[in-house]
Amino acid sequence: MAEDLIKSLNLQPHPYGGFFKEVHRSTQAVKPLDDREARSASTCIYLVMKNEDIDPWHKIKSEETFFYHKGTFLKLYTIDEEGKLTTRIVGDTTVDPEAEFACVIPAGVWFAGELVDKEDTYGFFSVAVSPGFHYADSEVAHVEKLCEQFADHKELIERLHKDPPKAE
């Protein structure tokens, strides 16, 4: 089923994990309140994650909202500046009252994700970013530094780690 969805939506491997396709990039531009140049007001992608795929620790300079469509649920972990770990489930609230159909990740917060069920399964989500996603606004965690900063969460940080994509 996941392979059919990936093929029918023409998804490509995502540098952080899973498969994606940008489906919207606003033609409206906004100027962030910092020194960055104007950005698209918003972007949206489809995201399919399978089995053991992870969304490794990273942060971006914009808010990111995950929306559940179908399949297994997505468990998102955030660590704020004070080191507080929060776990949220992106999924169907009629199946799991703890789940949320939409989950907002604040700008500048470290986060990672993994599927709740990992055997022969997949999850299908949309992810909206505002101001729109730009690779220059994202940072993939260096696991050693993140473990130093948040030693209480070392095991989780190491488990949901992936080396940053190499520049070409």
Image: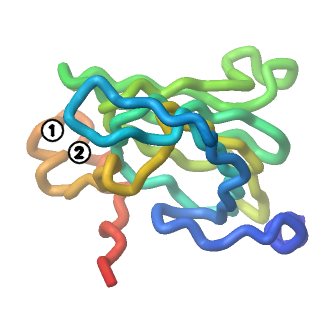
Residue 61 at x, y percent in the picture:
34, 36
Q: Is residue 76 above or below residue 136?
A: above
Between 74 and 7, the one nearer to me in the picture: 7
The residue drawn where x is 68% and y is 25% is 102
Q: Is residue 125 left or right of residue 167?
A: right
Q: For the C terminus, which image quadrant? A: bottom left
Between 62 and 115, the one nearer to me in the picture: 62
The residue drawn where x is 11% and y is 38% is 149
Q: Which residue is mark 2?
A: 154
Q: Which residue is mark 1?
A: 151
* Amino acid beneath label 1: Ala
* Amino acid beneath label 2: Lys
Q: Is residue 16 left or right of residue 11?
A: left
Q: For the N terminus, which image quadrant? A: bottom right
Between 137 and 120, the one nearer to me in the picture: 137
Q: Is residue 44 left or right of residue 94?
A: left
Residue 144 at x, y percent in the picture:
14, 56
Q: How is the image coloured?
A: rainbow
Q: Is residue 49 above or below residue 81?
A: below
Residue 119 at x, y percent in the picture:
72, 61
Mark 1 nearby-residue class (10 Å; few <14, some 14–19, many ≥20) = few
